[in-house]
Image (spheres, rainbow, N blue to C red):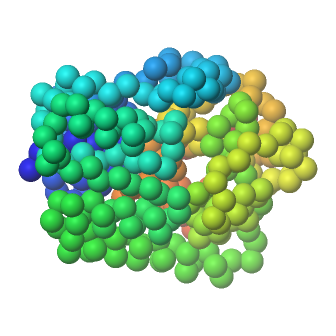
Amino acid sequence: MRIASLIASATEIVAALGFADQLVGVSHECDYPPEAVRGKPILTSPKMDVKKRSLEIHEDVQKIVSQGLSVYNIDVAALQKANPDIIVTQDQCEVCAVTYDDVVKATQTCLSANAQIVTLHPDSLDDIFTDILKVGEALKVKGKAEKLVKEIRGKMSEIQKQTQKLQKKPRVLCVEWLNPIMIAGNWIPEMVEMAGGINGITKKGDHTIVVTPEQVKEYNPDMVVVMPCGFTIQQTLENKADLENLPGKIFIVDGNTYMNRPGPRILESLTILAGLFHPDLFEEKIPSGAVSSFV
């Protein structure tokens, strides 16, 4: 089997199901597991400089999208050389990875008609597990995927059982982008509640929304968890002026590794939230290097 993964979360799913050695190409954002992606052909690239500040990246993305273009390129020549028979991509977010339409066009251009496209669409926590099962079915390891999902769900339920009994729960805002301020939706509100917090502005079932600084201050959170999609902690810290506009106690999570990757490590993301909300119970379980406080 020859597998191309065009989104980082899909690469993690493929590896968790035991098919890392059958990856023949990955996206420019795929970095985990390191041994699974090391030396693999890179099949995509961004059309903007992803090292810029938050507002600059947002403005660049808006310019590209306003022209009816995709934010990312597919290296058709590299895709053809990789010659996958399964391509895993997504159609949930046009600024998260290459678009589904672009994948279809590239596949029709350079691959055989037998190449299978597996499309993920994670809007909620349940959708993440559905997508894991979908990949498992495509790779003909349905049972293994079901076992993985059961294991992750079980461990997440254990955390929820401990937090649901707690009386004191912090009012939380989860910031997915700094400028403009975007409050995380999709699976994050549900995870905040599971981790023993009270999620602000967005609720379960909502998509990520843009808000004003006034709306953030009006909510008056006890804690702000900053998790910009695709940003490491260091890159987030480079947006100091934007961070200083946020109220309450501020924690920065590695948004490139956690929270924004709807795959097996969603469990670690829940652990991080629980550790921030209730450090007496869960702080020691936060992965090393995953969080930094902003003073």
Of all residues, the one furthest to the left in this rendering is 1
Q: Which quarter of the figure has residue 262?
A: bottom left
Q: Tell me which residue sits at (9%, 50%) in the image.
A: 1
The one of 185 and 219 positioned closer to us in this rendering: 185
Whether 270 is drawn above or below 173: the answer is below
The one of 17 and 88 positioned closer to us in this rendering: 88
Q: Which quarter of the figure has residue 222?
A: bottom right
Residue 56 place in picture, x, y as percent: 64, 19
Would you say 96 lies left or right of 36 here?
A: right
Whether 54 is drawn above or below 6: the answer is above
The C terminus - image quarter:
top right
Residue 135 place in picture, x, y as percent: 27, 59
Determine if residue 33 is in view.
no
Would you say 227 lies left or right of 17 here?
A: right
Determine if residue 73 is in view.
yes
Would you say 201 lies left or right of 274 here?
A: right
How many numbered dots are placed on residues in this image?
0
Whether 184 is drawn above or below 127: the answer is above
Residue 164 place in picture, x, y as percent: 64, 79
Would you say 236 lies left or right of 78 here?
A: right
Q: Tell me which residue sits at (58%, 64%) in the image.
A: 191
Residue 77 place in picture, x, y as percent: 20, 22
Q: Which quarter of the figure has residue 75?
A: top left
Q: Tell me which residue sits at (83%, 46%) in the image.
A: 216
Q: Tell me which residue sits at (38%, 25%) in the image.
A: 73
